[in-house]
Image: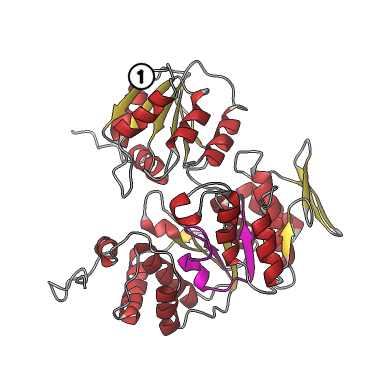
Amino acid sequence: MSLLPADSAPGVRRTLGDWLRWQESLHPTEIELGLERCRAVAARLGLLSPTATVITVAGTNGKGSTVAMLDSIYRLAGYRVGTYTSPHLLRYNERIKLNGMPVDDDTICAAFEQVEAARADTPLTFFEFGTLAALVIFARAGLELVILEVGMGGRLDAVNIIDPTVAVIATLDIDHVEWLGHTREAIAREKAGIMRRATPAVCSDPAVPQSLLDCAESLGAGLALLGVDYHFQPTEAGWTWWSGEVVLEDLPRPALMGAYQLRNAAGVLKVIDLLQAAHAITPAQIAHGLEAVSLRGRFQRLPGAVETILDVAHNAQAVAAFVANLDVLPACPRTHVVLGMLKTKDHLSVMRTLATRVDCWHLATVEAARGARASELLETLRQLQIKAPARAHDSVAAAWAAALGEARPGERVLVVGSFVTVGEVLRLIELPVPAAKP
């Protein structure tokens, strides 16, 4: 068994960094899907029956946007809200938020101590440890709503130890094939695992796989479908949403770029509709929440002589949405891309989708678990026989510096491919400027 972070030095305070490094070594594999171990520890901690309303969000893409909109609307309407998301961009604390603010190191460390005391000899993965810590923090916080984002899949993800009040499934596509399957039908079956018998659920994908419908029917889950049970229509000034006799007109578009965000927002409004009796929300509060929502790393534009656009898109569907957003921007003379990906992603599909919008490629080695080498990305790019210049770099920082060095005023730099890639560039951008010497 791995020693605790400060076991060798009694009395030394364990920092958040100590805990996280230790958790990475606690389990022999980074990912082990299954609920038994996590559920057993949660039961010892008394976490399996939260008093708050629980909204669980799954999906290939759109999860983060869905969580962000739900949080923004409910929180700005005065409700006490906790959110659990992953992965983070800059700091682990971003994963666990109370009323829109990341919790502090001491709060997380105290929760880790509780989880460690309860787990005994049960091995937990890094994600499972963090999920349990989030639930500990939420249980203490007196929240009215808890919004949980599934890490991967749904059926066997640690988040799924908690029964949701409403389950939400955003868009579905091919990703994480080594764990979830190679078809939309197989992947939808895994995502459907967050639904519960006779419990409402919402799907915001416009083309729902039959396997998801079959799972909902077998459970008797009330699955609300986009285009069947609820609808939306863009208008010149905003958009209209309706479900049954409920009609909301003149809504502002979400403050997240992309036409597809209306699909996510439509699903969010159906969740609010389902929970209206327990947590009343007015049209004005919906409008306020949509206008105020923010989410870093999702088509995040940083203005300047050379504009930078950052997006965590890492599969073909997400990159296609990213490209669609690019196409509505004014044209620029040249577009440079900093691309860093994980080994497990479909490099070929992502590059093929980006290819017609990129004039210069900067391929980065991602120094992370399952990170792909720049040389691997370069080999994939060659398979596409792309004539645009391409360079391999031994780090994201080196690729970013090279792209900025080559870009001229009026040109554009894209940073895309993974949370790690975007997070590293954001960290570089946010580094404090050294004070000038007297």
Along the line of sight, the residue nearer the viewer: 387 or 277: 387
State the image quarter where residue 188 is shown.
bottom right
Query: Does residue 373 show up?
Result: yes
Magenta segment includes 368 = no
Residue 408 in the image: above or below residue 153: above
Magenta segment includes 161 = yes
Tell me residue 143's x, y (percent).
55, 73
Along the line of sight, the residue nearer the viewer: 202 or 179: 179
Q: Residue at x 58, y 37 (%)?
A: 321
State the image quarter where residue 4 is shown.
bottom left
Secondary structure at badge 1 equals helix
Q: Which residue is mark 1?
A: 406
Query: Does residue 293 show up?
Result: no
- Work out which quarter of the rendered image holds the C terminus and state it: top left
Q: Amino acid at mark 1?
A: Glu
Q: Is residue 38 left or right of residue 229?
A: left
Binning the other alpha carbons within 10 Å of mark 1 as few (below 14), some (14 to 19) or many (20 upward) gives few
Q: What are the residue bounds of the magenta stretch?
A: 146-170
Along the line of sight, the residue nearer the viewer: 160 or 118: 160
Q: Is residue 138 left or right of residue 120?
A: right
Tell me residue 120's x, y (percent).
30, 81
Tell me residue 121's x, y (percent).
29, 79
Q: Residue at x 36, y 53 (%)?
A: 91
State the image quarter where residue 70 is shown.
bottom right
